[in-house]
Amino acid sequence: MLNEFWATSSTAYKTLVFSAMGLIAVGLILSIAGNTTGNQGLAIASLPVIGVGLLLHVTGLVVRGQKIRKSYKK
């Protein structure tokens, strides 16, 4: 089921997943860079980037859940 879902999932869902992963990764890199260099502003600025990535991740879960729910009704 999981492999089939990814193969048949919509472009919108794939875009949500990759955008979420990308934003979370960028946020983590900014956070690590800010904390290792002592740049407090960079470390704080990374938090909204991680937050947006997490929101996109949750949105992707909702989209996936709705599609699975619709497939069960058929």
Image (cartoon, rainbow, N blue to C red):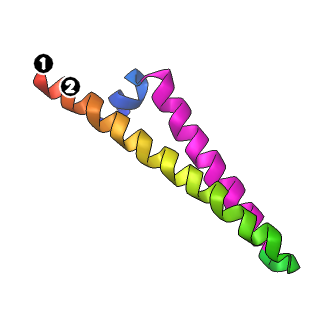
Answer yes or no: is residue 49 visible. yes
Image spot of residue 65 (x, y percent): 28, 38
Q: Is residue 65 above or below residue 33?
A: above
Along the viewing direction, whichever of 36 and 41 lies nearer the viewer: 41
Where's the C terminus, which quadrant?
Answer: top left
The residue tagged 2 is 70
Q: Hey, what amino acid is under mark 1?
A: Lys
- Residue 12 located within the stretch drawn in magenta: yes
Q: Image quadrant of residue 1?
A: top left
Q: Residue 20 carries which label?
A: none
Q: Which residue is drawn at 80% across and 76% down?
A: 40
Q: Is mark 2 on a helix, strand or loop?
A: helix
Q: In this view, does 15 lie to the left or right of 34?
A: left
Q: In this view, does 39 lie above or below 24?
A: below
Q: Which residue is drawn at 64% across and 59% down?
A: 48
Q: In this view, does 71 lie above or below 22?
A: above
Q: Hey, what amino acid is under mark 2?
A: Lys
Q: Distance of mark 1 from mark 2, alpha carbons?
A: 7 Å
Image spot of residue 32 (x, y percent): 75, 71
Image spot of residue 11 (x, y percent): 50, 22
Q: Residue at x 46, y 30 (%)?
A: 13
- Magenta part of the protein: which range? 10-34
Q: In this view, does 69 lie to the left or right of 51?
A: left
Quick check: marks 1 and 2 in contact, CB under 8 Å? yes
Q: Residue at x 24, y 32 (%)?
A: 68
Neighbours of disc 1 within 10 Å: few (<14), some (14-19), many (20+): few
The residue tagged 1 is 74
Q: Main secondary structure of the magenta part?
A: helix
